[in-house]
Image: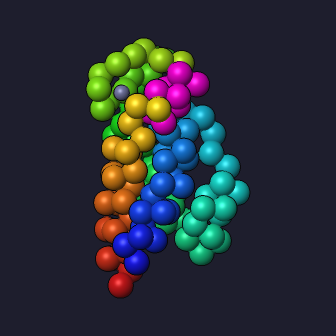
């Protein structure tokens, strides 16, 4: 189970970074990672994590993990996936574990 969470979290990093960067994430992308039955859980987890990692002031995006910015949408996405991949993955893992606990 634990390695499953880790693998899933790894795949969700890109989606969380996209969402945090205000780039649209399609329903299909959640289904691809989580399967049809898990897509809603995937959305909840990604929503919570993406809310924490980026802040928006006026129309400008700033990284909340290190305070850098402002970035464009694309710049935010690249910053998050290059610099903070492992941190975001850990946050996703934690949220996934909470979700799994609440289901059991
Ligand atoms: Zn940062």
The residue that appears at 48% across and 17% down in the rendered structure is: 71
What type of secondary structure mainly makes up the magenta span?
A: helix
Q: Is residue 63 above or below residue 35?
A: above
The residue that appears at 34% across and 68% down in the rendered structure is: 97
Q: Which residues lie in the magenta part? A: 74-81
Viewed as shown, does residue 29 lie left or right of 70?
right
Residue 87 locus on image (x, y percent): 33, 44
| Location of the N terminus (image quadrant) | bottom left
Residue 19 locus on image (x, y percent): 53, 41
Q: In this view, does 57 lie above or below 64?
A: above
| Location of the C terminus (image quadrant) | bottom left
Q: Can residue 22 be seen in this view?
A: yes
The residue that appears at 54% across and 65% down in the rendered structure is: 40
Q: Residue 58 versus residue 5: which sits nearer the camera?
A: 5
The residue that appears at 60% across and 61% down in the rendered structure is: 33
Q: In this view, does 51 lie above or below 57?
A: below
Q: Residue 52 versus residue 66: which sits nearer the camera?
A: 66
Q: Residue 9 versus residue 19: which sits nearer the camera?
A: 9
Q: Which residue lies furthest to the right in this view?
A: 28
Residue 65 locus on image (x, y percent): 30, 32
């Amino acid at each position: 189970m634990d390695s499953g969470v880790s693998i899933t979290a790894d795949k969700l990093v890109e989606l969380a970074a996209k969402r945090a960067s205000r780039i649209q994430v399609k329903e299909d992308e959640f289904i691809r990672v989580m399967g049809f039955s898990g897509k809603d859980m995937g959305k909840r987890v990604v929503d919570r994590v993406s809310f924490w990692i980026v802040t928006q002031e006026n129309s400008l995006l700033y990284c909340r993990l290190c305070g850098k910015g402002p970035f464009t949408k694309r710049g935010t996405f690249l910053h998050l996936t290059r610099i903070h991949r492992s941190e975001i993955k850990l946050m996703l893992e934690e949220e996934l574990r909470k979700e799994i606990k609440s289901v059991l």
